[in-house]
């Protein structure tokens, strides 16, 4: 009976048949898109007026100390919310590569080092960072208080303007978060294939290019890529050392997750602090239990692999220019460059060139035909 089933599977899939274990692994990368779930720590999560206010603030250059830099300076919609730079440039150069904001609501930790535990807390960081928007809470609050449209919109979303500037800064960040939660990538060739495989639809299975199929087999098989790049968003949301050198410049290193945990614990804006709207603090469980270990030094968060075509260069410091370079990195990785106290998942894959190309073809099949975002015209008054 099992043999008969396997035969059917072979017939249905043409030249390249997947085993039950492979089908199971592939199915775990869907379905896509995942359903929306409001963030309990942000009482305006999913609120239409908050999304609109957040969108305005996201493109608002007056949210920077010199009036010239908005969030969209580095997170450009047409570049899948990145900037094409190896390391981002705000008021001055920052240490890391700008990540995409598509599907960002699915993260548990935010930033390459996970220094924040909510999307709204993460949205405060660039406003206050002297290298990015360079504002103080007072300056950000003054912008909203002094602008008729922004303060009208704020009142519509949150009720009265708060007396405390820091509370108003948090409100701004919660509106920004509500907007960013709406950014999602669309279905891809991979998702069509994955669903066809699950419902055993030969025509749907057939459509997916053979090279991508072969690359996918490496991804879930001997490449062990799906040990870390798991689930529908292709990330476990956790932190690893993949052997990317973390020198920012001679004599200065990026400690990654090690510093991220310190910052997270010290932050007044974390989910254990006074600004979370989750009364039971159930969302703070991971934050409460996070432990700092030596191995966290030089670890960075596993990125999603959806929609990579427009987000080059890659890795936390933009060190690798193309997807080909990333695959080359994994095929030649030296165990000496990995932490001795880290996990031993990675080893040089030594893939022959055609297989490396197949892996790239698979990664390219995770690209959608354009995200869901259409910028709304800002002509409408608050009223
Ligand atoms: C100077 C360029 C720059 C500007 C301006 C900027 N960002 Fe970013 N953004 C980055 C970089 C670089 C990171 C990665 C930060 C890190 O890991 O420490 C990042 C990370 C993020 C993340 C985390 C994404 C993730 O996957 O964890 C969010 C959310 C975000 N930014 C939102 C914003 C918002 C909202 C604004 C405006 C208030 C903004 N950014 C302004 C460059 C920028
Ligand atoms: C041990 C966990 C782990 C494994 C296994 C792993 N990755 Fe990664 N991957 C990461 C982490 C962590 C990063 C970010 C590293 C950094 O920036 O320093 C990353 C980055 C990437 C990127 C860059 C994405 C971006 O937006 O910059 C790609 C592409 C990628 N991995 C593909 C793969 C492929 C293909 C495999 C299998 C050959 C693989 N990964 C195996 C953890 C892993």
Image (cartoon, grey):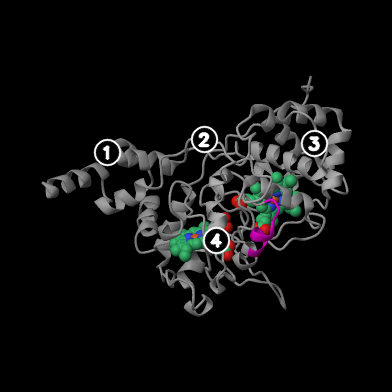
- Whether pointer 2 and pointer 3 mark residues with C-beta atoms closer than 8 Å, the reply is no
- What residue range appears in magenta? 262-269
- Secondary structure type for disc 3: loop
CA gap, disc 2 and disc 3: 29 Å
Label 3: few (<14), some (14–19) or many (≥20) C-alpha neighbours in 10 Å: some
- Mark closer to the observer (2, 4): 4
Label placed on residue 296: none
In the image, taking residue 339 as reference, residue 88 lies left or right, namely: right
Where residue 182 appears, x then y in whole percent?
60, 36
Label 4: few (<14), some (14–19) or many (≥20) C-alpha neighbours in 10 Å: few
CA gap, disc 1 and disc 4: 42 Å
Q: What residue is pinned by disc 4?
A: 290
CA gap, disc 3 and disc 4: 32 Å
CA gap, disc 1 and disc 2: 27 Å
- Does the magenta portion include 383? no
- Does the magenta portion include 266? yes
Where residue 82 appears, x then y in whole percent?
66, 49
Task: Name the residue furthest top.
Answer: 383
User: Disc 4, ligand 1: is the CB inside 8 Å?
Assistant: no
- Mark closer to the observer (1, 3): 3
CA gap, disc 1 and disc 3: 56 Å
- Whether pointer 1 and pointer 3 mark residues with C-beta atoms closer than 8 Å, the reply is no
């Amino acid at each position: 009976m099992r043999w008969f089933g396997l035969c059917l599977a072979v017939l249905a899939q043409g030249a390249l048949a997947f085993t039950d274990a492979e089908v199971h692994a592939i199915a775990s990368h869907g379905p896509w898109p995942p359903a929306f779930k409001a963030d309990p720590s942000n009482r305006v999560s999913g609120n239409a007026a908050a999304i609109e206010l957040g969108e305005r603030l996201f493109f608002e250059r007056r949210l920077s100390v010199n009036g010239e830099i908005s969030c969209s300076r580095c997170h450009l919609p047409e570049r899948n919310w990145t900037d094409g730079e190896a390391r981002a440039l705000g008021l001055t150069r920052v240490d890391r590569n700008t990540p995409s904001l598509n599907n960002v609501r699915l993260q548990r930790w935010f930033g390459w080092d996970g220094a924040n535990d909510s999307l709204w807390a993460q949205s405060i960081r660039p406003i206050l960072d002297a290298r990015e928007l360079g504002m103080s809470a007072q300056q950000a609050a003054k912008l909203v208080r002094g602008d008729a449209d922004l303060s009208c919109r704020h009142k519509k979303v949150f009720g009265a303007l708060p007396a405390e500037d820091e509370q108003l800064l948090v409100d701004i960040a919660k509106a920004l978060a509500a907007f960013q939660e709406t950014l999602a990538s669309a279905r891809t060739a991979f998702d069509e294939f994955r669903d066809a495989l699950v419902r055993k639809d030969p025509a749907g299975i057939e459509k997916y290019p053979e090279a991508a199929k072969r690359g996918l087999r490496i991804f879930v098989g001997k490449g062990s890529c799906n040990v870390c790049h798991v689930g529908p968003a292709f990330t476990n949301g956790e932190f690893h050392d993949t052997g990317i050198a973390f020198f920012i410049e001679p004599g200065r290193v990026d400690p990654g997750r090690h510093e991220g945990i310190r910052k997270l614990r010290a932050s007044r804006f974390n989910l254990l602090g006074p600004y979370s709207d989750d009364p039971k603090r159930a969302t703070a469980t991971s934050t409460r239990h996070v432990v700092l270990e030596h191995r966290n030094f030089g670890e960075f968060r596993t990125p999603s692999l959806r929609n990579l075509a427009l987000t080059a260069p890659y890795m936390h410091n933009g060190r690798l220019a193309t997807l080909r370079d990333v695959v080359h990195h994994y095929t030649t990785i030296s165990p000496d460059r990995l932490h001795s106290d880290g996990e031993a998942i990675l080893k040089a894959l030594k893939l022959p060139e055609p297989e490396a190309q197949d892996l790239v073809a698979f990664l390219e099949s995770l690209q959608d035909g354009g995200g869901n975002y259409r910028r709304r015209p800002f002509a409408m008054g608050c009223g």
